Amino acid sequence: MIFLHTADVHLVPLSEPDGKRRLAVLAELCGLAAQRDGLVISGDLFHSQAAASDQGLLSGLKDALSKAGPKPVLIIPGNHDRPGGVGPHPLDGRHDLGAHVRLLSKEPYEETSIVGVRFFGIPFQTERSGGELLRALPPEARGAVVLLHGTAADRKTLTMYGYDPEDPEESGDSIFLDADLSDAGAAYYAFGHIHRHESWSLKSGSAAYPGSPDAVTVKEEEPRQVLEVELRPGKAPIINKLALQRSARSLRKTVLAIPGAEGEALKDAREFIAGQRSDVRPVVYIRGLGSGRLLEEGRKDLEAGFKDRDPRPIVKLRADVLGDEELSSPGLLQDFGKAMAEAAKATGADPELTARAALIGWLALRDDEKSLDKLLESIGTGS
Amino acid sequence: MKLSKLAVSRFGGLQGPATLAFDSASTLVYGANEAGKTSFADALRTALFGPPERGRATAEGKTFASRYGDDYSVEAQWLNSQGGVLRSTAEKPTAEEDIPRELFTNLFMLKGGECTLSGKDKLDAGFGSKFAKAVLGAGEVDLDSAIKLLQKISDPKGSTKWSKHDKKLKDELALADAKLADLGRLRELSLKRDKADKAVAELEARLKSAEAELRAAESGSSRLEAEDLASDRARWDNAVSDEEKARLPADAPALTGLEAFAKAESDAGRDCASLESRISERHAESAKLEDALSSLKAKAEALPDKVLCEKLRFSLGDLGTASSNRPASGAYSPVFELLVPLIAAGIGLSLGWMFKGKLGAALGLVVCGFLGWLALSLLKGKAGTGQADQEKLLSAFRPVAASLKWPDVPEQCAKKLSERDAEETRLLAEISARREALESAKTDVRRLETELSEAKSKLSVASADLSRALSKTSVSSIKAYISRKADWEAAKRTAEHLEASLRGRLGIESDKPVSELKTKLQARITELKEAGLTSESSQLKRESLKPKLESARSLREKLLKDLEASRRSAESARLEASQVQASIGGGEAAILAKAQQARAAVDDLSLWRRAAEEACATVRRLSADTGKRVAELVQDASPIFSELTAGRYSGLELQGPSIFEEESLRAVHSTLGSKPVEWLSKGTQDLLWLCLRMALARRIRPEGSLLVLDEPFLTLDPGRAGKALEALLGSKWLKGWQVLILTKDPAMVPAASAAGVRVLDL
């Protein structure tokens, strides 16, 4: 029995830059699923409620899903489909997505089967803890496939990808511990929520995050894929990664600005964006010190210049921007900026570290203890 | 960049409109007070950088607005280093790239007395440091201080503030990690709680079933107990009834009375028996005596016939040998003697039969027989007495002896006769004795019979007494009385035992009335019957019920104990889990997020420390460069200073590691030797300040540019000022530079003219 496992498609309205590509990626996935026994989507099909109510998108979604037909497509709602994990949500059957699409949205779980194999879908919900949800599964879940959406907290390398306090669409999380997963005894846990691929073995069975099939955030730099899972009775499932033609990954670069040489940083950014292939979403962070006015103007120019690129690049101004007057020092401060840039170039230091050094050095040279105190206070507050 | 023209209108002291033209060479701009020198400098600055921003609430902006208002115009014309002409106005100032504002303000435009008159810092606090801060940096740069500051940040023990914050973040991380660890504990507790809850549910179910069994058993037991009680009550009732029935009447004699009666009766009976026995004995005795008498009589009758013997005796007497033993009677033939009684008896028989039948016959037989014998006897006596003569006597004797079959020897017969007489005497004596004894016995019998009669009478009385007494107890005998009494006592004991047992079972004390016992007993039986209604009697087996009940009770006890333990365990796990949950405070996702944030914050602070280290390294490099540059600067300024002091000082030198150290910059006097510049006069310090700025300006713009000196020699005496101006204007060090010197000192005008410098009089 072979099925495909994906999650975190994060469909956005078609009017948004990534809207059409995400839908195309889903259609590609469904096309691959038609050659297997089915497809499971472990949550976050939609990025937002706005997406879930976009008629054009819903129509396109039905078309995309139809490419898998008649092979079944199992879908559970994730935290983006159902913010907060309570109440109604767009995957509760209100939309006709095709006869072969099975929405597993009943709490605490809903059961179905594909070619005789049991599948249990645990929709995203927050009234019960992950452990409680797993313990609520019936004995028949042993040896079955379980779809779930949340953070596998024992995967230390993954957990840092699970939480983005800056994302307003993040609304709640379910925490699943390996011990509980082992106790429930499913053959395969089809996870969703963390956009990075990882698979691991449990005392009984295996678990995997497929990663998002198309990069949703700037951190998602690894190649995107869908998982092909072959269930073997009495043996661990075989998990293959299948590459996707239509998806894109992010690729980040930090360019360092120095006072008086802001143009060079912008030039570096432009060259980086222009040099990337179409399956890469370039993400540029402008860091360091510089004229806020010049850097912001440059950032806007870059965005305008690449507005037709798909995926559209992201340019973020993360420099410690200073007023023109602060920057027009004739002597040591400018010399310091240049010295920092030269040192960073010579040593190949981490641009993030260099940018911070530039700022903290700048403040120290100005003997600006107040700002240093503010900086210290800001550490750990998220600001 | 050099100024070629400045056109101003309505600008402070320069109301104009005026157009001031300049050539590339230096110019002395002279004007008395209020002639417009300050307006000239401000117009120049406005043409270069525009007016200070109005929106800014700076002193500079306010002063500018109040001094110049809005209605002015300023336009300047410049020549750049390539010879190109540039125009700038207040509205469209020169791009800063040409002459950055800071550079112009700090370096290319000097105010007289700037070094000694302006600012709060005293130069004696460190000339070099002051110069570096004012001119080399953006006003406040202190490399050593920056290095120290960065070191404090990068060194984990350097700054209390950073250490504290670091510790706080690490504490938060430790707490968050502990809470994460608590998640595992919480899970274990939840599992424990769930397990205990499950156990509780199972035990409750088992308890329910055990209680049902117990109820069934109890119901059965109730039923049986009801039956037992009912049965015991029936037995009790029976016993009570038996007791009542067997109970002796209140006036019934006591057993002792009865026994007295009985004893009397018994004694009387015994007396009777004894008397009867004695009578019987006497009768027996009498019979024996009569037998003996008969025997004696027979013996007497068997003696040789008395008549013969009397005849013999007579014969003997007659013969002389007669003896007193001779028989008294005569002898008759035996047939005669037999026939006489028999005939008499026959007559009596016939007569009796005729009159009285059989009885009469018998009586006639006896009486007549006796009478016949009696008549014969009388006849015999009369016959013997008539014989006499010896021979006659012997002849008479012999037949008599022969009749007696005695030897016909008279002696022998006399002996025999004597013997027979003796025998007859003895027999008669014995007969007499026997007759007396018989008589005595008969007397005794009569007496005894009298006594017996009395005894029987006593017995009758005693029996009547006893009978009367027994009749009161409705028993026929004392045995029956005893038996009845025994029955009564047994029934009473049974009744009492059952009552005590029932009282005990119902918990009713013995002093409570029986009616209460009965009422409660009935109520209890009803209650038990109701309780036992559910049990099926067919399944009730008394012998198996008890162990069943005990087993159900012990199972229930055990289950209750287990249940209590499980409940305690569940409760304890629940409590502990809620404590852990409370100490964690918040959902799992929030805890994980918090831990990630805390870790990120610790990493963030660590990265800032590394950044401070990096920055510190760069500042150190910069410091080393700056020291080198300052040394070069001092070297450049040294001949200028010598020139402008007209040789009083041969030059400058640096002592110590850095210009920022106090007294490190020293002036070498031509005759007095080296001394720290802080020791110089104020005017000479200002001059030194000018020299250092000129040297720095030359280094920054080696090709030359515009240098504006506003009252550069303000703090010098007029003589030294003139010489200094001459030296300045003639200095080779300012070759290629356009120097505009603003002054109100008229003595400067001829000095400038003498040096071939154009004078612009405002």
Image (spheres, coloured by chain):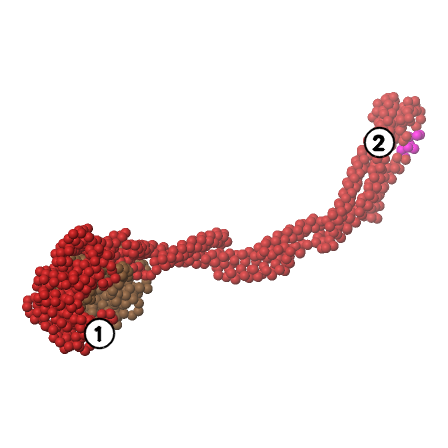
Chain colours: A brown, B red
State whether residue B543 appears in this view: yes
Disc 2: host chain: B
Q: Residue at x 20, y 69 (%)?
A: A12
Residue span colored magenta: B379-386
Q: Within 10 Å of the Cα at label 2, are there few (<14), some (14-19), or many (20+) other Cα atoms?
A: some
Q: Read off the residue under disc 2.
A: B430
Closer to us: B293 or A60: A60
Q: Could you tell me the amino acid type at mark 1?
A: Arg
Q: Could you tell me the amino acid type at mark 2?
A: Glu
Q: Is residue B366 left or right of residue B617?
A: right
Q: Provide the secondary structure element on which disc 1 rests.
A: helix
Q: Are marks 1 and 2 on the same chain?
A: yes
Query: Magenta stretch: residue B380 in it?
Result: yes
Q: Position of residue B68 (x, y in %)?
A: 20, 75
Closer to us: B555 or B740: B740
Q: Residue at x 24, y 63 (%)?
A: B119
Q: Quadrant of residue B326?
A: top right
Closer to us: B442 or B722: B722
Disc 1: host chain: B
Closer to us: B409 or B185: B185
State which mark lies toward you, 1 or 2. 1
Q: Read off the residue under disc 1.
A: B67
State whether residue A262 appears in this view: no
Q: Residue at x 71, y 49 (%)?
A: B478
Q: Within 10 Å of the Cα at label 1, are there few (<14), some (14-19), or many (20+) other Cα atoms?
A: few
- N-terminal of the pair, mark 1 or mark 2, is 1
Q: Position of residue B452 (x, y in %)?
A: 80, 44
Q: Quadrant of residue B115?
A: bottom left
Task: Examine the residues drawn in magenta and state their main secondary structure.
Answer: helix
Q: Residue at x 42, y 53 (%)?
A: B565
